[in-house]
């Protein structure tokens, strides 16, 4: 994102000095250049004596360099393609083998795909992988609105690439990878809303709250995806992601109830992000009014 934006840019779990999805706001001096002194992050360390002397009680470190939007979009495209390919391919193989993968296998496949993509690309793009997540973060001012169309465009193209690649490789059983409701439309909408709420509630916790264990974000989000598939997989396919449904639906020519999968995940994600923001603990600075805190964050 541009340095002038007043919102956070995506980062990654376990990035030294930066929480997940939390970027650095660059400050400029009077000459319009980045001020290195203002960008320094200082922290206290325990004094350490050695033969040459002792380590100073305060050390400073420069933030990591900003990531260009092109790199972020490229990582988002690759990560989304891996996720859609893995989830759709597992469903197709499950149909081809008369259910040998089982629901647990389908859940594990998508959960593992989410986990490895977050851990491998989260530090570049934030690993949204989902238009509903991108829109929810933008609504909470954790992501710039001007980058939302670019991210969603990359996610949609990645979905089409993954789906049509599978159509070529695994034709003619592409239909097994399409998420369609097996019950009523009302039941499908409600389940997609609820599981998307669950997903975004967890994502918001590990991505935006400094008290959460951000280093385990990939595991937490992947486990949530697995749980949601075990809950709703038999009824709706547990999409939670508009592009998880869109690409395979176009490739297979099956648009049954597609409006549910394009609306319910976005509404559920907005609700989940909003509810977590409402119930999370206030910032330490607001409570302590400048007093030093005895609590330590796992993410800083």
Image (cartoon, rainbow, N blue to C red):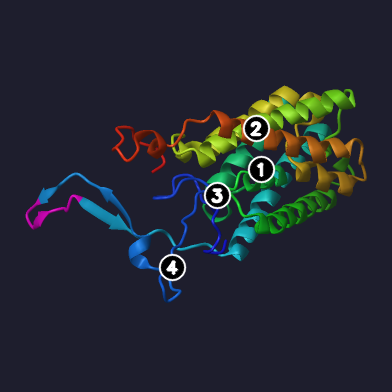
Q: Nearer the viewer, residue 247 or 103?
A: 247
Extreme residue toward the front, this view: 289
Q: Is any part of residue 225 visible from this angle?
A: no
Q: Which residues are magenta?
A: 50-57
- Please identify the quarter of the rendering in which residue 64 is found: bottom left
Task: Name the residue tied to disc 2.
Answer: 272
Mark-to-mark CA distance, 1 and 3: 17 Å
Sequence-wise, the earlier of marks 2 and 3 is 3
Residue at position x 89%, y 23% in the image: 184
Mark-to-mark CA distance, 3 and 4: 27 Å
Give the SS element for disc 1.
helix
Mark-to-mark CA distance, 1 and 4: 29 Å
Mark-to-mark CA distance, 2 and 1: 9 Å
Residue at position x 77%, y 56% in the image: 157
Residue at position x 45%, y 63% in the image: 65
Q: Are marks 2 and 1 in contact (CB under 8 Å)?
A: yes
Query: Which of the two marks, 1 or 3, is nearer to us in this view?
Result: 1
Residue at position x 42%, y 76% in the image: 31
Q: Nearer the viewer, residue 285 or 275?
A: 285
Sequence-wise, the earlier of marks 4 and 2 is 4
- Residue 131 in percent (x, y) is at 71, 47
Which numbered disc covers residue 28? Answer: 4
- Residue 254 in percent (x, y) is at 92, 41
Q: Residues within 10 Å of mark 1 (few under 14, many from 20)?
A: many
Quarter of the figure with the N terminus: bottom right
Query: Which of the two marks, 3 or 4, is nearer to us in this view?
Result: 4
Residue 112 horizontal side relative to residue 266, left or right? left
Q: Residues within 10 Å of mark 3 (few under 14, many from 20)?
A: many
Dominant secondary structure of the magenta stretch?
Answer: loop
Which numbered disc covers residue 136? Answer: 1
179 is within the stretch colored magenta: no
């Amino acid at each position: 994102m541009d340095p002038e934006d007043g919102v956070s840019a995506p980062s990654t779990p376990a990035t030294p000095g930066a929480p997940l999805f939390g970027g650095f706001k660059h400050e400029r001096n009077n000459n319009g250049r980045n001020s290195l002194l203002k960008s320094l992050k200082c922290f206290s360390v325990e004094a350490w004596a050695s033969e040459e002397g002792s380590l100073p009680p305060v050390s400073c470190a420069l933030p990591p360099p900003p990531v260009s939007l092109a790199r972020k979009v490229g990582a988002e495209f690759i990560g989304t393609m891996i996720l859609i390919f893995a989830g759709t391919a597992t469903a197709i193989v499950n149909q081809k083998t008369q259910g040998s993968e089982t629901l647990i296998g389908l859940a594990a496949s998508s959960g593992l795909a989410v986990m490895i993509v977050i851990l491998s690309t989260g530090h570049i793009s934030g690993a949204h992988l989902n238009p509903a997540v991108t829109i929810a973060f933008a609504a909470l001012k954790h992501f710039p609105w001007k980058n939302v169309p670019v991210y969603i465009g990359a996610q949609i193209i990645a979905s089409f690439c993954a789906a049509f690649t599978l159509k070529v490789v695994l034709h003619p059983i592409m239909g097994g990878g399409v998420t369609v409701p097996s019950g009523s439309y009302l039941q499908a909408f409600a389940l997609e809303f609820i599981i998307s709420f669950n997903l975004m509630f967890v994502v918001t916790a590990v991505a935006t709250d400094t008290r959460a264990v951000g280093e385990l974000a990939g595991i937490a989000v992947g486990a949530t995806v697995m749980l949601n598939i075990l809950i709703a997989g038999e009824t709706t396919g547990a999409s939670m992601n508009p592009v998880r449904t869109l690409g395979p639906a176009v490739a297979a020519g099956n648009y049954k109830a597609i409006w549910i999968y394009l609306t319910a995940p976005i509404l559920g994600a907005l609700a989940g992000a909003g509810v977590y923001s409402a119930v999370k603990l206030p910032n330490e600075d607001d409570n302590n009014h400048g007093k030093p805190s005895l609590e330590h964050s796992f993410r800083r």
